[in-house]
Amino acid sequence: MSEVKYIGGYPEHMRQSIEIVNRSRAKRKDAVPAAMSAEQRQETLQVHPDYAPGGKRELKIGPNKGDPVPVPVADLLESYPLIDKTDVDLSVADHEVDVMIIGGGLAGTAAALLAQDRGVEREKILLINKLRHGDCNSIMAEGGTQAADRPIDPPDRHFLDTIGGGHYANKPDVVRALVEDAPLVMHWLEELGVVFDKRDNGDYVENWGGGTSARRMHSCRDYTGLEEFRVLRDEFRARRIPSIEHSPAIELTTDASGRVTGAVLYNLETGAYHVVSAKATVLATGGFGRLHIRGFPTTNHYGATADGLVLAYRAGAKLRDADTVQYHPTGAAYPVQIVGFLLTEKLRSAGAQPINKDGEAFVFPLEPRDVEASAIIRECYVRENGITTPSGLRGVWLDTPLIDAIHGEGYIERAFPAMKRMYARFDIDITVDPVLIFPTLHYQNGGVETDPDGATNIEGLWVAGEVSGGVHGKNRLMGNSTLGTMVFGRRAGMAAAEYVRSATGGQRTFQHVESFVNALEGAGVAPERRAPMLLPEYRGKAALARMIDVW
Amino acid sequence: MSESKTMMERISESTRSLTTGVDSRDVEHWVTIYIMGRGYEVPADLTIMTAMEFAGYKLIRSCGCRQGFCGACATVFRREGQYKLESALACQTRVEDGMYLVQIPFSPAEAAYYDIESESYDYSVFSKHYPEVARCVSCNTCTKACPQDLEVMDYIQSAIKGDFESLAEQSFDCIQCGLCALRCPAEIVHYNVGHLGRRMFGRYGSPEPEHLKTRLAEMERGEFSSALDALVGASTKKLKELYAARVRESDE
């Protein structure tokens, strides 16, 4: 390593290409490539990991039998349970509640708050967290939240942007709920004390997002999810709503009719199990980034392992659009310590352009994410115009200094403190030099199918947030995820509160699990695979090879 | 088509060490770190977090978003031969030879129970919920402990002055890791003080925009209902036409 000379955080061979980028900046500033036509988009998508051959297989059992999903997802859905009925005593409930919420990100926390607002006593709500309340993708959302709230931007424009970006696979009534509730969510967040970016006259600063036809992105610097989430969590804690941390749900329970009646939790530290009895369950467990589909690094938090999909599918919940995966166009590709980390789309909203090794802008910077990501993959692997890092990754530049060239010096510092700080930790100044990018696994577009209130085909089970399917179709737009978590978290919380007024508790059994195991055996699935995964395996190979268990 | 397949395999191959773990045979440069006092040889390119995993730790505490936003991986370390205790986020910091480190699994710090609707927008909100802010001796230990490089002591001083706007500005990038509170000799819980102040500023110091209020009133009157009804009922063909016909808002 000592033989390589680093200048401003970059080795010499990358520095040469940076100089070309720096020289072409002034020329590119007012010459942005045109947006693609529908045909050009379709052609570009051929290199997208979802459309490139391989990587998927059809499910052998369950409600979506015959549907193709990414292989790691299929493997998890077709796994045997971690426990069976001989391991636990389901007859004794350690917690008896009206509304149980599994997953404490924006969606789950919003559901808890609204359930209480709608009359469920706080002691009758329980929020379950696999790790900390705050181990979620929500907290890492950077760019913004969409809401159509300016005169030029009616909600039907937001509807069209969303459904076109999703390739028309979205459920229209669910999209309607998304865009109609968006201003309400903004109002709610204002009342709770979220500090949004505003102009001197008090209006919101609103930015572009990929695939939007109006500026509709509300931000809190580049810490939008952090600010929204920490306010909801603070409100949740200030109201003393009960929650449990470091205890994931490892199985749901159902009664004879198939209704969801509770869950079994597993204390990650002591190994003890706990049984929860719940009249209503809201599943808000997030997505599957840590499955590293097609070998991609991910922007997702440590616990994004599709546990909710696994639990719900065993209980008979129907999935939709589970075949598509969102790769964020701009993941970090250098330095190696931060590969796959998110570089917010807001950088491109503010004018940053993807640039190849020769200093050329090769794509309109704000295509929908699947198209933008494909164009970057094509530039690196088909047109061979990428830059290779010392660890062997390819990427193209994202010309961040162009942002200050457009908006004036100091803009990056004010609008992108998180990005600037992250790179400064590795001696790179993003106001002076561009950063190297390559797409990174970002979002589960589909999931458990819902109606506009988060209800599933299973009685007693609601879903909200990334684990759900329908609202984003086959490709989510920037700013619709944080929005979706809160719109449908709120709706699911309200619907669950309404349901428990008349619902009674049910028997807790593993009947659905037993039927599922029978189906697995019937399909000839070998018993090695077990799920939910709970956490990905990152331990060193040498350390794992020597591990023994003595307790 | 086989070319595409090869491309996916090439991408996967280039990221292998990031998704399935580092193979010792591929590593040229090594350093020694001391995790809670015990020494481990780890690849020099890893972060504190990935180095602990390489050494064999299955992280349950002190690991969350893995990208510098959630504050779970607060780490205290000392460099061999130095007396100074430093702090960092394990996911954002490259290992260094001779680093003695421990991660903070939990901060048993107090957080206020309050109803934002019934608090006063002045200094009394701090003296009521966090009276210890008045004990600040301006030693600046909090600022030195902050892995985000925030001016923590300055925002505590803003709280004491009842200056909510400055407090919000100075504390905004806080990820609530808790290191400031753990180091403070006056036992101030800076990150919770900061959060109370920011929420108060958001609620009372930064009014809801007029254009949002207008939109809410329009929605209340059902002004967009028929347009949305039409879209929900439209065929995919019709939606495609409407999508193609959108006019992008002017950049001006």
Image: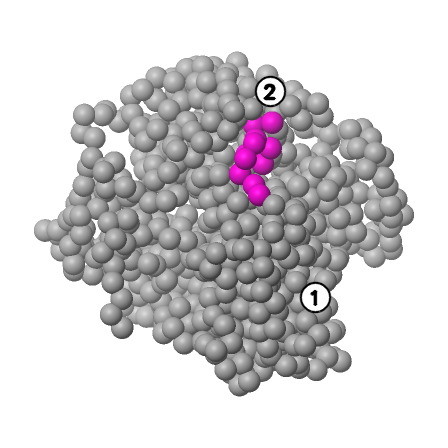
- How far apart are the alpha carbons under marks 2 and 1? 49 Å
| Dot 2 and dot 1 within a common chain | yes
Q: Position of residue A362 (x, y in %)?
A: 55, 19
> Could you say which is closer to the camera, residue B197 or residue A99?
A99
> Which one is closest to the eye, mark 2 or mark 1?
1
Q: What residue is rendered at 10% in x and 51% in y?
A: B81
Q: Is residue A202 left or right of residue B110?
A: right
Say which quadrant the C terminus of chain A sits in. Answer: bottom left
For the rendered model, the colour scheme is one colour
Say which quadrant the N terminus of chain A sits in. Answer: top left
Q: Position of residue B159 (x, y in %)?
A: 44, 62
Residue receiving disc 1: A458
Q: Is residue A305 left or right of residue A34?
A: left
Q: Is residue A53 magenta?
A: yes
Q: Is residue A186 left or right of residue B12?
A: right
Quadrant hosting residue A124 = bottom right
Residue receiving disc 2: A32
Start-end of magenta stretch: A46-57
